């Protein structure tokens, strides 16, 4: 079978087809109907590795630190944890993850990764670029293994390797300071072609994230090749506990529809979305929302209002009363979301009704409030921050519910965050003023469970069940 055919055959069996698109290069259309929540594609990445969220280098960029993350599921490893006895590098949170990783890919990566790690002096690369050094080494390993194993290489690996050669790199558009770092990496690796590979990786990278931020990077060329960006996406990706990139339908998708993901936060105003898409992915968005063909145009119009035209709530209030702080509209949206998570028509009606009353400029304000409250909680200033943090989280959730389909993972993760903060507010000695009650916490945690459907052994699954147990305790 020819290289191109292997990709076409792989996707056509899943009801998908690649087509040429006048404005976006290629696009993928559904060749059958997909129900909301249905898995569209699931495939192991060509390479992936964990990073520690939140750690920043001297220039404020996230830096690599793998000491405490599992090489398969990227969750935190316990103090005594298994490690691959052959390379001594890959570590795991459990014996199951070690076995799954070995069976999926580590059997062909193990010696190669060990050799490249010993050969290359990573200290010569700036800390914030070390993840890309690892990515270049990992992708090299996987492609070398594919050609060595030939017909014995698993089909997913052959498909990913072929898709990798077909990705756009936008090399000419990359800023000089970035390509200079890539050239350093290429020198360290002794492989001039690494510059092009890193450009290709840079604009096709997937981040694995949990509620605290990025926990890993994934190179998944098939999904990159297939899915264009839309500011009104009908699909979303998630990295599963078994180490696969899973794409699911966020809405019902009809045969003939293009399938798309959001590369950037759809709640940013259009100007900011465009800025981010052009800085990181090097294109001007031509999605249905940006070309004014989508019903979400009203929200766009409101999001693009200038901040001075809006009356923003003052910065973090010093005298904070929950009922006044969680505006009626936010609670109403959250209530509709919780009662009707399966009914997007209902949510659509609420969107229509409320969109004109809601200041979308306030979204970034509430995001900042939430982060500020969490920082203060982490600094242990006082447990009086919990009700504030819960109120901010409910506002952020309401914005997500207005801008995304109710099955979007961002909505699920925010439900979990709001549930945790509301529970802490309920337990804190400060006045909670009755906004966060057990029923709300339980409904938020149940919504997180039904949207994210995490395995009970995963860290998100354990967090959700812990809350549900607490709420249901007599
Ligand atoms: C990850 S690739 C997707 C596959 C790509 N269409 C192809 O033909 O290889 C991302 C690239 O597709 C194009 N693209 C994706 N979404 C787009 C959009 N909404 N508007 C315009 N171009 C888009 C851009 O060139 C972008 O750099």
Image (spheres, rainbow, N blue to C red):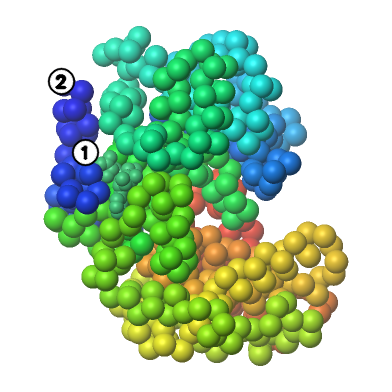
Task: Determine whether the residue tagged by mark 2 lies in a helix, strand or loop.
Answer: loop
- Distance between the Cα atoms at labels 2 and 1? 15 Å
- Give coordinates of residue 367: x percent, y percent: 60, 68
As drawn, the residue found furthest toward the front would be 176
- Give coordinates of residue 139: x percent, y percent: 44, 24
User: What residue did someone put label 1 on?
Assistant: 11
Q: Nearer the viewer, residue 322 or 295?
A: 295
Q: Is residue 38 visible?
A: no
Q: Is residue 88 above or below residue 94?
A: above
User: What residue did someone put label 2 on?
Assistant: 1
For the point 66% across and 88% down, the residue is 323
For the point 55% across and 23% down, the residue is 185
Q: Is residue 66 left or right of residue 13?
A: right
As drawn, the residue found furthest toward the right would be 381
Q: Which part of the image, by quadrant, shows the C terminus?
A: bottom right
- Give coordinates of residue 385: x percent, y percent: 77, 72
Tag on residue 66? none
For the point 58% across and 43% down, the residue is 215
């Amino acid at each position: 079978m020819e290289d191109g055919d292997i990709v076409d055959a792989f996707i056509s069996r899943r009801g998908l087809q690649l087509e040429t698109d006048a404005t976006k290069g290629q696009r993928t259309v559904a060749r059958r109907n997909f129900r909301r929540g249905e898995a569209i594609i699931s495939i192991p990445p060509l390479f992936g590795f964990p990073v520690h969220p939140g750690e920043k280098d001297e220039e404020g960029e996230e830096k690599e630190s793998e000491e405490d993350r599992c090489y398969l599921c990227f969750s935190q490893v316990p103090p005594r944890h298994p490690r691959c006895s052959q390379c001594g590098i890959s570590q795991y949170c459990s014996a199951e993850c070690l076995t799954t990783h070995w069976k999926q890919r580590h059997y062909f990566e193990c010696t190669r990764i060990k050799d490249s790690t010993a050969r290359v002096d990573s200290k010569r690369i700036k800390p914030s670029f070390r993840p890309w050094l690892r990515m270049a080494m990992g992708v090299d390993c996987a492609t070398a293994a594919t050609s060595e194993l030939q017909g014995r290489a698993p089909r997913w690996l052959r498909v990913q390797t072929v898709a990798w050669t077909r990705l756009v790199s936008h090399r000419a558009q990359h800023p000089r300071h970035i390509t200079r770092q890539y050239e350093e990496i290429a020198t360290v690796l002794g492989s001039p072609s690494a510059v092009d590979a890193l450009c290709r990786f840079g604009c096709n990278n997937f981040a694995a994230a949990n509620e605290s931020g990025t926990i890993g990077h994934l190179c998944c060329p098939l999904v990159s090749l297939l899915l264009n960006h839309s500011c009104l996406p009908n699909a979303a990706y998630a990295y599963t506990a078994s180490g696969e990139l899973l794409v699911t339908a966020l809405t019902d998708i009809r045969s003939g529809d293009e399938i798309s993901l959001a590369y950037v936060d759809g709640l940013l105003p259009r100007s900011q979305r465009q800025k981010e898409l052009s800085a990181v992915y090097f294109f001007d968005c031509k999605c249905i929302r940006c070309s004014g063909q989508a019903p979400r145009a009203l929200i766009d119009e409101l999001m693009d209002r200038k901040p001075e035209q809006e009356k923003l709530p003052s910065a973090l209030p010093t005298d904070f009363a929950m009922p006044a702080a969680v505006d009626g509209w936010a609670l109403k949206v959250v209530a509709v979301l919780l009662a009707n998570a399966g009914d997007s028509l209902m949510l659509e009606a609420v969107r229509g009704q409320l969109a004109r009353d809601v200041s979308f400029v306030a979204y970034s304000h509430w995001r900042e409030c939430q982060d500020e409250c969490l920082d203060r909680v982490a600094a242990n200033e006082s447990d009086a921050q919990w009700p504030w943090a819960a109120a901010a989280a409910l506002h952020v959730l309401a914005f997500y519910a207005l801008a995304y389909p109710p099955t979007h993972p961002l909505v699920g993760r925010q439900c979990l965050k709001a549930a945790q903060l509301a529970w802490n507010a309920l337990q804190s000695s400060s006045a909670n003023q009755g906004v966060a009650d057990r029923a709300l916490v339980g409904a938020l945690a149940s919504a997180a469970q039904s949207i994210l459907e995490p395995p009970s052994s995963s860290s998100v699954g354990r967090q959700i069940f812990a809350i549900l147990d607490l709420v249901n305790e007599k």
